[in-house]
Image (cartoon, helix red, strand yellow):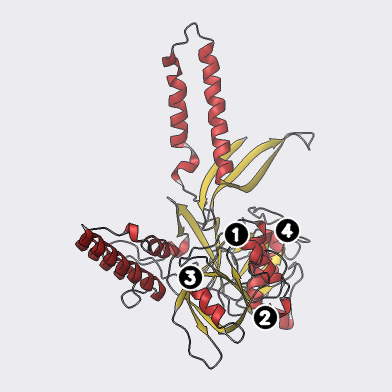
Amino acid sequence: MNLELYTVHTKEKKQILCIETYRDRRVHSKPTHVNRTHTLTERESIQRTFHSLSMQFFSLRNTVRALPSRNPVAFLPALFAAVLLLAVHPFANGALVLNDPDGEPGWGHVYISGGVVSYEFFRAKFGGKFSCDLTGFPVVQLGLGCELLSGKDADNAKGKIAMAARGNCSFNDKAIVAEKAGAVGLIVVNNQPGLLRMPAGVIKMKEGFDVTIPVVMLKDTDGSAVANITSQNNDNLVRVVGESLVKGTVRLAGRCIEAMEIGADGNPVVPTEPAKEIEGGTVRVFPSASGDGSQEYEFLTAMFGAPVNTKQMSYAFGEPVEGCSEFTNAADVKGKVAVLRRGACMFANKAHHAQAAGAAGVVIVNTENGLSRMFGGDTKSNFVTIPVAMVSKDCGEELEAAKGEGLLRMAPTAVKANLWDQAARFCKRMNWPEDDEQREDLYNQLKKKHDPELTEEGGPERMRIIEKAYNEANEYFEETSAVV
């Protein structure tokens, strides 16, 4: 068996892309070469790696034991082999570059405009190059995509990315159906876990027809999520972006990079690309439709779910308030944003129950004045197709005070989760320096990063937290110095 491992970093977790080629003797009377591609978790990949290391180590150890002398120095070759294997192992460099003969990458992600997560794909072994229009395209569903379209159905597919389920006809036939209808690309949704590099297969539509649109495959759960999210809002555009992974960074690849301009400094000018994933934004609570909004708070999105709805929406607290079981007030929550409290179960379970009750979104109130991006941690997160966000304890109190007729409105911004990590760190007095000048210098540095009047990444709530902590630290150290 030949084993290749490539590190693939995602927001949810670091994964190891594993491509195995082995000889399957269990099914066929003759040895048959089979290619299998799947994804391993980091833990599984490490287990495989160290299993390989241990086998080699113990093989060398047994060889040494067979020698007349058992001098510990004899084990040095085994130790050297182990270190060397770790240094040169394929996942050590964190690179994934799968280029096809036409220069396009065979790997990348599907992005939804305003989305909070991306969806990994493999490119087919046929088809055209990726579009360099990074604004995205609407989506049209073709079902199985095995029958040629005409009339209104064909008109509806023009200029859109088509989605079709795997099965009933060849991958190439599905691509021909999509291209003849005027689609600009095709996403095939697998009918089982995993991904594969799709071959053309037996062509029934028209032999000799060259498919010129890009064709990619998504996993079954990812394909369902993209289909459900885009069907809820026609404004959600989809981008199919060919990429490579170099030193842990996902980069645009293929002809879109080759066609970019060279700047005056001799370096390539990377094309302007929309934000791939929205991590958070601002939220404002309104006591009524005609009332003035509260002060501005911030939210961070979950690492699963749909793009945030930016309209002013009604909300209702779920019952039970933790959302860890079926809602007993589903009628009150239906069509509204369900407000739940953190704790007692996984975030994905809360969102799953809210979605089952008909909620249009979920806001989870933290137990403290800090925020973090919520990890699904459960297969249920793959099926959550409504927006999910976390707000602070202070914002939760505003929501509680205005419940009944209250409304809320959310707006994505450039805020990143690591900014909240920093703000949460310095909301504690113990993390401020005792020296007055050092403390003031730190405050000014934090202000440059968090003050919304100074930077796009700034946030009013973060700035309030930092200012409060800074004032409390000044008072504390002033009292301390006075006592001394």
Q: Which residue is mark 2?
A: 335
Which residue is located at x 66 percent, y 44 percent?
A: 35
Image-based side of 423 in relation to 324, left or right? left
Tell which circle, 4 or 1, labels the residue nearer the N-terminal end: 4
* Tag of residue 191: 4
Which class describes the residues within 10 Å of circle 1: few (<14), some (14-19), or many (20+)? Answer: many
Q: Is residue 164 left or right of residue 363?
A: right
Which of the two discs, 3 and 2, labels the residue nearer the N terminus?
3
Residue that carries the numbered disc 3 in the rendered image: 280
Q: Distance between the Cα atoms at labels 3 and 2? A: 22 Å
Residue type for callout 4 = Asn
**Camera-side residue of 11 and 18:** 11
CA–CA distance between discs 1 and 2? 23 Å
**Mark 2 vs 4, N-terminal side:** 4
Could you tell me which residue is drawn at 74 percent across and 34 percent down?
25
Q: Residue at x 53, y 30 (%)?
A: 53
